[in-house]
Amino acid sequence: MTKWSKFNMRINRKVMCIVNRFLHQDCSSVWESVVGLEIHAQINSHSKLFSGAGTKFMVAPNSQVAFFDAALPGTLPVLNRRCVEAAIFTGLALSCTINRVSFFDRKHYFYADMPAGYQITQNRVPIAIDGKLQFPISSEKGNKTPIQKTVHVRQIQLEQDSGKSLHDDDNQQTLVDLNRAGMGLMEIVTEPNLRNGLEAAAMVRELQLILQTIKTCNAKMEEGSLRVDANISVNLPGQPFGTRAEVKNINSIRNVKNAIDYEIARQIRLLEEGIEIVADTRYFDVKLGKTVSMRDKETSLDYRFMLEPNLPPLRVYDDDSIEEAQNPSNAINIDNIGRSLPELPEAKRLRFIKQYKISSHSAVVLVSENELGDFFEKVMTSGRSLETKKVADWLINDLSKVTNQNEITVSQCSLTPDDFADIVQNVSDGVISAGIGRQLLNLKVKGDSRSVTEIIEVNDWKQLTDRNTIQDICLKVIQENPEQVQIYRSGNKKVIHRLMGVIQKKTGGKIQPQLAISILETLLDQDT
């Protein structure tokens, strides 16, 4: 691009921003943002991609290192069948085409945590290509109906992970832990179909759910099992994509959103000031809440890709061609793997909506936590006549709150689906109030071994439903609160809720609220 062309583009940007400001619009609305992701998923396997070393998390440094991982001369790679099957399984779950023949390449670069001086990856012909991932996006503006979006998956490639550099600032030295070196990775590369941090975070969460459902990766971002690199650029409508920056190793769903949104805003701000974007590699500083440059990319790196000479082409087969394999007993049959695919999150959401007649929002929330969705189904098949919407609401709004407060998951608490069903049933039947139901949830989550019925009986938690008893209580509260009664009779009907609060406190939350309000209104509306 000539200097004159760059000058014209700069003037156009300024003019568009001035026009938008004059029209009281946000200047960022002038721009289009483009986001593509490269996601590294560590494969669930007992051994590494090309060696027999272990893959446990949080063990002593350099305690899981085979000779091959340390690049000792004369050692050769031996491909892990489990890792290949996991990559195929993931490819099928993402609607990819599985290449019948794929190749391994050497990608040369020199870091201390890569002893061989190269990484074995699949640059030219990866194991899976041309996939797609549909995912829901929940609006941040209060609209509970999720939006569906599809991102295209360019490829999935097998590759080995690098080790980890540990920086000791006190002694001004860097140590290397090779426990992670050689672990099997799936690099999942998307097309630049995403537009902002919200979309990217929702897409990563859906991928996380899929990987956990098919058990090819535990997808625990806090352990580094799932790491996200985001390529981000902005451009004017109708113009080519802008210069992109890459934000490396984003380690949580929240940080995916925050890092991408910050980077989009940063690039827009620079372009509006007439400053050209520099292609660079950045990281997201969580404390500062912004991306920080690590190194520039003005000169493209020459990785000197070459065919890996110590690994033959990777061949897989289907039902129609299995006999062509030289050793059918060791061949990996794609169709066999496909037949074992479990129900995926999107299919589960659609089934929940159709089978249980719940809203799309409730289905998204329930399936967003695999354990919560499974718990919901167990409650619904417990043999009780429960309203599905009530069960879903109690799970989403009440049980989730209690488990979060106790910092445990649904599977870690002692509450069983039968106990939960008993609580919801008792609330629905009017035996106990909703407030008492929440107290019961707390007790059961914390390990109370008594039955729901026994706890209700021992604590005398059954609701007061006798009309005469409730009327006597309401009359007493009216006599004790003349000021609130006067406010009510002056026209402020909302004060009745304060009086109901007093009644609930007097009765320990045991009173039937609808009946109590009805009686209280009747008494308050009578002439003094």
Image: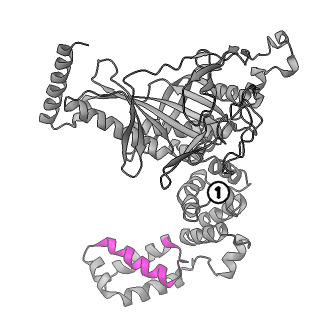
Q: Nearer the viewer, residue 171 or 439?
A: 171
Which quarter of the picture shows residue 489? bottom left
* Residue 135, x across and y down, in percent: 52, 34
Q: Is residue 473 magenta?
A: no
Give the main secondary structure, helix, strand or loop, of the magenta stretch.
helix
* Residue 254, x across and y down, in percent: 46, 46
| As drawn, 409 above or below 514 | above
In which quadrant will I find the N terminus? top left
Residue located at (45% from left, 45% from top): 255
- Is 75 placed left or right of 20 in the picture? right
| As drawn, 440 above or below 74 | below
- Is 43 placed left or right of 490 in the picture? right
Residue under label 1: 410
Which quarter of the picture shows residue 131? top right
Looking at numbered disc 1 in the image, what kind of residue is underneath it? Val
Asked whether the viewer can see residue 358, the reply is: no
| As drawn, 394 above or below 13 | below
Asked whether the viewer can see residue 523, the reply is: yes
Count numbered badges in the picture.
Answer: 1
* Residue 140, x across and y down, in percent: 39, 45
- Is 456 placed left or right of 20 in the picture? right
Residue located at (65% from left, 55% from top): 386
- Is 496 placed left or right of 370 in the picture? left
Q: Nearer the viewer, residue 52 or 288?
A: 52
| As drawn, 317 above or below 519 | above
Q: What SS does tag 1 mark?
A: helix
Q: Nearer the viewer, residue 475 or 453?
A: 453
Q: Is residue 512 magenta?
A: yes
- Magenta range is 491-513
